[in-house]
Image (tube, rainbow, N blue to C red):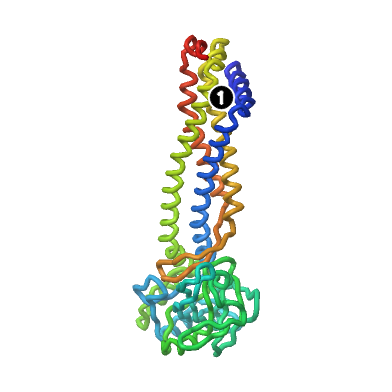
């Protein structure tokens, strides 16, 4: 109990004297806040991209591609193959029709709003069942496109990032201008990065004949995926690859999230080293300026252990304040901020919002605590090892 009382008394004394060292303490807090803010900000990019991809996938939805294809861009299925897929047992039905959509995926160029430079924007040709297969589509402005016409729906993310996607505007598709008739949302998923139109009209515009690139199918039951896959992969009329939509989008997001996470960890690590040195400097200065005080306390009977602990707790308090400040600034600045990046799997732009999650905030504050503890450890040990007689003689 005496040891604990010493720690409480010393820590309270240290915290009361922070005002006398306001400049150095503020420097340590700001340094740690900067590290935490950058750490959270960079990793929120990866979290946002991952969320945009993962919320798009559903366990009860299967994606059918040409065997050997990694993406829709490299896949092709002729009309007869697509019909075999949509007629197979295991697909859910609504109003007597299979919930399966045969789709095309092409790339068009549109200028970015921020820079005016052209970017690859995905244009998806869909079938009448597409909205039911996805299940989370909602038109928030304008109306749906009419089948058989040169009309498109733009995802909310695409409309915010690229010029010419306002309702009533026209965009170049092939050799013609197609009219934007509505804006849709998809629960923040990757579909919001796309432009949608009638697959039959898109086939004609790009001279694709009676071919598609993928079939999206809503299954009767998520647990029936393997049976559905086996029926298709063993059918001699087909040469297809069948994956869950969740697995497909997870694979699509792996490369970019790994890159962002690696870069973020590297940047935060380098800044963290600087913050550790800043904390070391602050705590060494605190110990140096209070050499006689610490020696007096030891002469009065305060042990080395409580002194070490009190200095560490002071460093921890500064780190937590810096961590909370950095986390708060990161949340205010980054959460929900929309941007676009290249999906290297499809070579098209994906729009998404930065996502500052509670887990990410917790990691940032934990990082701040680690910096504070490392930065306070050696000064704390020095304070405990000061020779009492020599320290009392210092001016």
Residue at the image point whose x is 57% and y is 88% from the top: 147
Foreground pick, 224 / 62 = 62
Of residues 78 and 151, the one drawn nearer to the viewer in this rendering: 151
| Percent position of residue 304, x then y | 51, 17
Q: Is residue 177 visible?
A: yes
Please name whichever residue, 189 or 293, is drawn nearer the observer in this view of the structure: 293
Residue 333 place in picture, x, y as percent? 59, 54
Residue sticking out furthest to the front: 395
Q: Residues within 10 Å of mark 1 (few under 14, many from 20)?
A: many
Residue 169 x %, y %? 59, 81
In this rendering, the count of numbered labels is 1
Q: Say which quarter of the image contains residue 153.
A: bottom right
Q: Residue at x 50, y 29 (%)?
A: 376
Residue 357 place in picture, x, y as percent: 57, 52
Q: Secondary structure at mark 1?
A: helix
As displayed, is residue 220 above or below residue 42?
Answer: below
- Above or below residue 280? Residue 101 is below
Q: Residue at x 54, y 88 (%)?
A: 150
Of the 4 image quadrants, the one containing the N terminus is: top right
Q: Quadrant of residue 10?
A: top right
Query: In the image, 251: left or right of 304?
Result: left
Report whether residue 191 is seen.
no
Q: Dot 1 corresponds to which residue?
A: 310
């Amino acid at each position: 109990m005496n040891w604990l009382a010493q720690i409480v008394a010393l820590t309270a004394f240290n915290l009361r004297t922070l005002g006398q060292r306001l400049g150095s303490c503020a420097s340590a807090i700001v340094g740690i806040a900067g590290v935490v803010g950058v750490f959270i900000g960079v990793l929120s990019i990866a979290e946002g991209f991952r969320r945009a991809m993962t919320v798009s996938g559903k366990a009860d939805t299967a994606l059918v591609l040409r065997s050997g294809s990694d993406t829709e861009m490299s896949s092709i299925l002729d009309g007869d193959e697509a019909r075999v897929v949509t007629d197979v047992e295991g697909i859910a039905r609504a109003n007597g029709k299979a919930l399966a959509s045969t789709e095309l995926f092409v790339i068009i160029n549109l200028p970015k709003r921020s820079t005016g430079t052209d970017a690859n924007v995905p244009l998806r040709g869909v079938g009448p069942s597409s909205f039911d297969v996805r299940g989370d589509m909602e038109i928030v402005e304008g109306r749906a496109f009419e089948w058989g016409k040169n009309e498109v729906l733009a995802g909310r993310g695409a409309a915010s990032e690229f010029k010419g996607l306002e309702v009533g505007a026209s965009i170049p598709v092939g050799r013609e201008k197609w009219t934007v008739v509505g804006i849709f949302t998809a629960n923040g998923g990757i579909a919001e990065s796309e432009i949608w139109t009638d697959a039959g009209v898109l086939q004609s515009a790009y001279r694709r004949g009676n071919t598609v690139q993928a079939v999206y199918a809503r299954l009767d039951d998520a647990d029936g995926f393997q049976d559905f896959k086996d029926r298709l992969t063993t059918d001699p009329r087909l040469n297809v690859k069948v994956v869950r939509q969740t697995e497909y989008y997870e694979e699509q997001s792996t490369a970019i999230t790994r890159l962002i996470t690696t870069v973020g960890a590297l940047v935060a690590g380098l800044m963290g080293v600087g913050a550790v040195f800043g904390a070391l400097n602050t705590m060494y200065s605190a110990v140096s300026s209070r050499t006689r005080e610490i020696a007096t306390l030891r002469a009065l009977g305060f042990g080395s252990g409580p002194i070490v602990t009190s200095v560490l707790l002071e460093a921890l308090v500064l780190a937590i304040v810096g961590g909370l400040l950095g986390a708060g600034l990161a949340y205010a600045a980054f959460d929900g901020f929309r941007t676009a990046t290249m999906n290297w799997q499809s070579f098209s732009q994906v729009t998404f919002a930065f996502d500052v999650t509670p887990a990410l905030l917790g990691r940032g504050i934990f990082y701040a605590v680690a910096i504070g503890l490392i930065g306070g450890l050696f000064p704390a040990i020095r304070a405990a090892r000061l020779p009492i007689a020599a320290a009392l003689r210092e001016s």
